[in-house]
Image (tube, grey):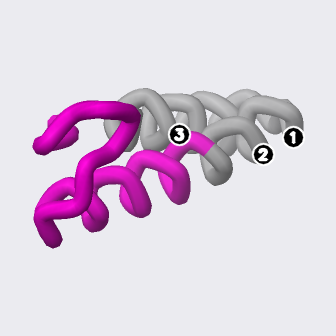
Amino acid sequence: MIVLGVILLVVGFVTGISVLWTIGIVLAVIGAILWLLGTLGHAVAGRRHYW
């Protein structure tokens, strides 16, 4: 999810499409939060680890 967010950020920046930029930021932030929760040992969506 983080990688997809970064890709959308780059594509949105290059093409000037603000919707892609916004979706990229949201996906990157959500992915980072899920990754952080997974590394701390919290179960995320019924899984012990989130990759």
* Residue denoted by label 1: 18
**C-beta proximity under 8 Å, tags 2 and 1:** yes
Residue that appears at 20% across and 40% down: 50
Amino acid at circle 2: Thr
* Residue denoted by label 2: 22
Which of marks 2 and 3 precedes in the sequence? 3
Q: Left or right: where does residue 23 sit relative to residue 8?
A: right
Between the C-alphas of marks 2 and 1, the distance is 6 Å
Magenta residues span 27-51
- Mark whose residue sits in front, 3 or 2: 2
Amino acid at circle 3: Val
Q: Which mark is residue 10?
A: 3
**C-beta proximity under 8 Å, tags 3 and 2:** no
Amino acid at circle 1: Ser
Give the SS element for disc 2. Answer: helix
Q: Between residues 37 and 4, which one lies in front from this camera angle?
A: 37
Quick check: is 16 in the magenta stretch? no
The quadrant holding residue 40 is: bottom left
Instruction: Tell me if residue 19 comes above or below residue 33 in the rendering.
Output: above
> Within 10 Å of the Cα at label 1, are there few (<14), some (14-19), or many (20+) other Cα atoms?
few
Between the C-alphas of marks 1 and 3, the distance is 11 Å
Give the SS element for disc 1. Answer: helix
